[in-house]
Amino acid sequence: MKLWGGRFETGPSEVFERFSESLSFDRRLIEADIAGSQAFARALESVGVLSAAERAQIVEAFAAILEQAAGPAFYDGAADEDVHTLVIRKLKERAGAVADKIHTGRSRNEQVSLDTRLWVRAEIRRAQALVVELMAALVDLAARYPDAVIPGYTHMRRAQAVLWPHYLLAYFEMLARDWERFEQTYARADVMPLGSGALAGSGFPFDREAIARDLGFSAITRNSMDVAGDRDFLLDFLHAASVAMLHLSRLAEDWILYSSEEFGWLDLADGVTSGSSLMPQKKNPDSLELIRGKCGRVFGALTSLFVTMKGLPMTYNRDMQEDKQPLFEAADQLRGALEMARVVVETAELKPETPLAATERSWVVATDLAEALARAGTPFHQAHQLVGRLVRESVRQGRQPSDWTTDELARFAPEFTPDMARLLAPEHGLKTREILGGTGPQSVARALKEAAARVESLRSR
């Protein structure tokens, strides 16, 4: 059964049928397709195409089809070109001749747009919920080690001491932006396209705003030609998914390093690691490596749809059928990565003494000393040079910051006052950074409390 064909003397070749079918992947839209078609049946009643009895018959038949679709044998033997054709065939089998009216004044172009918007809206909400739970896991892990001191890095070199919760809250902020980005994506998907026809608008006087309310959309599309050729809302989703995966990949890379023997800060749970088929001692961070690796698939999905859309003339072109597989692929990989990352975070154990020792062995306190000199009146450029010479001399002698006494500092340079010696211990320098957004203990405690409140606010939305 085709939704077209009167103009053709013969049907499509077997090769073209195989090449162009999409039921194998767009069947995931069946729930959205049925919900949209039920709403359209109600719209057809409103313009007199369907009687109340016919509308009820069609809506009930669609409900039965959706229930049947949950069964494992529903798609057995289906040779339909796409999910939309399958649903119409099933409707006719169940409702009879009245099924022929369901496509009155509706194009498959707008139908596909509607189905995809319904599907991606639901997927966005699922992704947002997973993002929030990962944010919550980061807050919980931060609260378990509120006073732990670790080195912060630039250029993969120890730079300044920070609190462990401050580090985790950096990823919290990335995820919060991801949540917001998905929210913005939702708004752009949340416009109802029915009534646009194939490209010129429907010839029937549908109340489009009423259909939008029926389907829970906040607005209607404004231009029928735009609807027929628009996949921007899917590009938005794929971009948001890609940025979220990028953030997960950065976390994964950090923790792959920090859980290695060379760093030794973190213990990853047995449940998120694996061993070697040859080397008995290995405990590999496979969950994090897979998160990092699956980024390529999501980035590839975004690139794929970009390239598909880049040269298409107005309005609809069959190329646009190629939007579904990248969309579904990205959504699946994002969901899996967010779930995996949450489990990794929930089960990770920090070994606070190891990163603390790393800060104490290194010169992460250098900036603290330079700023103390500047606060005491030494121009910062001179203070920077002075501390740099102190670091150079320490490296030459093989001395750590704690090896210097108050008297030795004063002999090295009279600008070093006795109270500055305490800054040779990283935990004291932290206390100078109580600025909002900084790593000072009080500032971080407030930020952690606020983060927990933000999680609860997002959970309640």
Image (spheres, rainbow, N blue to C red):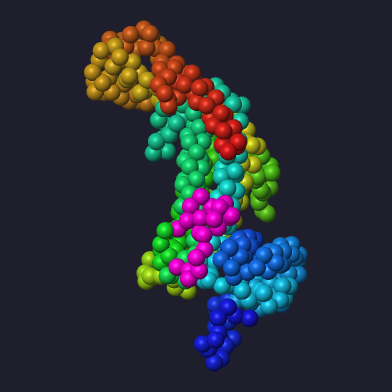
At 60% from the left and 80% from the top, the residue drawn is: 2
Position of 217 with respect to 155 (left or right) is right
- On the image, the x and y values in percent for residue 408 come to 36, 11
Q: Quadrant of residue 256?
A: top right
From the top left corner, tell me how far across and down residue 268 is, in percent: 63, 39
Task: Describe residue 407's horizontal placement relative to residue 143 as left or right.
Answer: left
Residue 417 visible in the current orientation:
yes
- The image shows residue 269 at horizontal and vertical percentages of 66, 39
| Residue occupying image coordinates x 57% and y 29% | 452
Between 220 and 148, which is closer to the camera in this rendering? 220
Image point (42%, 58%), residue name? 222
Nearer to me, 322 or 430:
322
Establish if 22 lies above or below 290. below
Residue sitting nearer the eye, 143 or 80: 80
Q: Quadrant of the N terminus?
A: bottom right
Above/below status of 293 relative to 271: below
The quarter of the rendered structure image containing the C terminus is: top right
Across and down, in percent, residue 423 comes to 41, 15
Please tell me which residue lies in front, 368 or 333. 333
Q: Residue at x 42, y 23 (%)?
A: 436
- From this viewpoint, is residue 241 visible? no
Q: In the image, is residue 158 part of the stretch drawn in magenta?
A: no
Q: How many marks?
A: 0
Q: Is residue 208 magenta?
A: yes
Q: Which residues are magenta?
A: 201-221
232 is higher (above) or lower (below) than 345: below
